[in-house]
Amino acid sequence: MYAPLETARLTLRPVAESDADSLFALDNDPAVMRFINGGLPADRDTVRTRTLPRLRHVCPALGAPGYWAAEETATGTFLGWFELRPLDEHSPAVVELGYRLNRAAWGRGYATEGARALVRLGFTRLGVERVTANTMAVNTRSRRVMEKAGLSFLRSFHGHWPEAIAGSEQGEVEYELLRHDWDRTG
């Protein structure tokens, strides 16, 4: 088991089986899922059989979880999850940063705080050379978190959406932060 990470207000810990109901509530909120699947409702069985195992996976390249449950340290309230997962399962060089927080956590700086903590972990202890993050171009809140976490805009692109959702026609964006740039500012 990997030790939890502590920030000023957050505890980031490995996702547990006991998080299933909280994950279902998170994925069942149309506002939370707006830029993921257009706000479609979640299926409890899918969360238990697909989402939970994916979030509990320990990445061999990192020797650490790829996903971290986020709790408010003062209250123990489940806020959502963060991702710092290698793009290649066998190499820690390039990782994807992501986050999904419940609405009550929005606008309070938790996403930036958690993202910065994982970026720091990646560059100082996990052998990461590049952090990348993607979102829909219209997802201005997520883009702002990426910027506040130290990532810079890299490119716009159009990915394949099995079913288009509002805003997908404007494409997606990729942000990145390289270790040598973080070393200068981090």
Image (cartoon, helix red, strand yellow):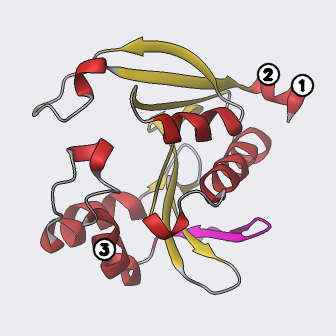
Residue 90 in view: no
- The spot of residue 37 in percent (x, y) is 21, 45
Q: Residue at x 23, y 20 (%)?
A: 169
**Secondary-structure class at tag 3:** helix
Q: Hey, what amino acid is under mark 1?
A: Arg
Q: Residue at x 35, y 57 (%)?
A: 32
* Span highlighted in magenta in the image: 2-15
Residue depth check, mark 3 versus mark 1: number of the one nearer the observer: 3
- The spot of residue 1 in percent (x, y) is 58, 72
Taking the image as shown, residue 32 lies to the left or right of residue 50, namely: right
Give the Cα distance between marks 3 and 1: 40 Å
Q: Hey, what amino acid is under mark 2?
A: Asp
Give the number of the disc on residue 181.
2
Give the Cα distance between marks 1 and 2: 5 Å
Residue depth check, mark 2 versus mark 3: number of the one nearer the observer: 3
Q: Residues within 10 Å of mark 2 (few under 14, many from 20)?
A: few
Vertical comparison of 102 with 112: above or below: below
Q: Is residue 166 magenta?
A: no
List the residue tagged with mark 1: 184
Taking the image as shown, residue 154 lies to the left or right of residue 168, namely: right
**Secondary-structure class at tag 1:** helix
Q: Residue at x 42, y 36 (%)?
A: 139
- The spot of residue 68 in percent (x, y) is 53, 62
Residue placed furthest toward the right: 184
* Mark 1–mark 2 CB contact (< 8 Å): yes
Q: Residue at x 70, y 55 (%)?
A: 113
Give the Cα distance between marks 2 and 3: 37 Å
List the residue tagged with mark 3: 25
- The spot of residue 119 in percent (x, y) is 69, 43
| Residue toward you, 125 or 115 | 115
